[in-house]
Image: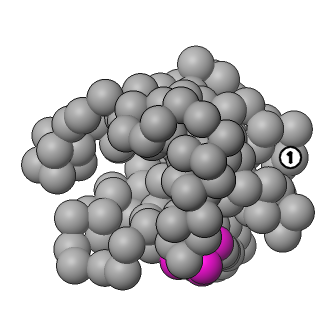
Amino acid sequence: MKKMKKETTVVLSLIVLAVASRLLPHPPNFAPITGIALFGAAHFKQKWFAFLLPLFCLFITDLVLGLSWINLFVYGAFALITRMGMKRKSLHFPSVLAGSLLFFIVSNLGVWLLHYPLTVEGLATCFTLAIPFFGNTLAGDLFYTVVLFYTFSTVKKTYLKTA
């Protein structure tokens, strides 16, 4: 039981550091939330907590960064990413790529619905203008997911061994 508490402390500490990085200057869309969603889905037995974790992290940082209607789409995207991550218990590049694509599609559909003409041309314009941000999204998702999974794995093997 003591080992479980130590593991939970390590997991939550890693997530706090990742969330704090969202508040530091960074390239647009280079953010830790997909990593947090996939990591939480893989490491928390309570699935309700895995769902709430990335949404809570978003909400807390959005109180500082700003809230808008687009947040509904962003939060929905991360709920879907968490659900997808529950099927995996380890790091898989296809899961990170799928999470990045899912975020790109859902969030930009929201941008289109809220800020562009609801036409095929409006949709095409919205997604075309979003393409340059996808590189940062994928890079951030890969970076934070790898850091969270491998740091935890290393800490677990090195410091959380059972006696």
Q: Which of 56 and 120 is in front in this view?
A: 120
Disc 1 residue type?
Arg
Identify which residue is drawn at 84% across, 69% down: 93
Position of residue 50 relative to residue 116, above or below, is above
Assign a secondary structure to mark 1: loop
Identify which residue is drawn at 11% across, 49% down: 64
Q: In which quarter of the image is the C terminus?
A: bottom right
Q: Give the range drawn in magenta.
A: 135-139
Q: Is residue 14 shown to the viewer in this render?
A: no
The quadrant holding residue 76 is: top right
For label 1, count other residues whose C-alpha is less than 10 Å away and answer few (under 14), some (14-19) or many (20+).
some
Identify which residue is drawn at 21% across, 64% down: 23
Looking at the image, residue 108 sits to the left or right of residue 20; the answer is: right
Q: Quadrant of the N terminus?
A: top right
Residue 34 magenta: no
The quadrant holding residue 58 is: top left
Q: Where is residue 12 in the image (x, y as percent from the top left)?
A: 42, 50
Q: Nearer the viewer, residue 77 or 143?
A: 77
Position of residue 143 relative to residue 14, above or below, is below
Q: Main secondary structure of the magenta part?
A: helix
Look at mark 1 in the image and give the residue it sits on: 88
Q: Position of residue 84 (x, y in %)?
A: 78, 38
Q: Is residue 114 shown to the viewer in this render?
A: yes
Q: Nearer the viewer, residue 129 or 27?
A: 129
Looking at the image, residue 146 sits to the left or right of residue 11; the answer is: right
Identify which residue is drawn at 33% across, 58% down: 19
Looking at the image, residue 85 sits to the left or right of residue 73; the answer is: right
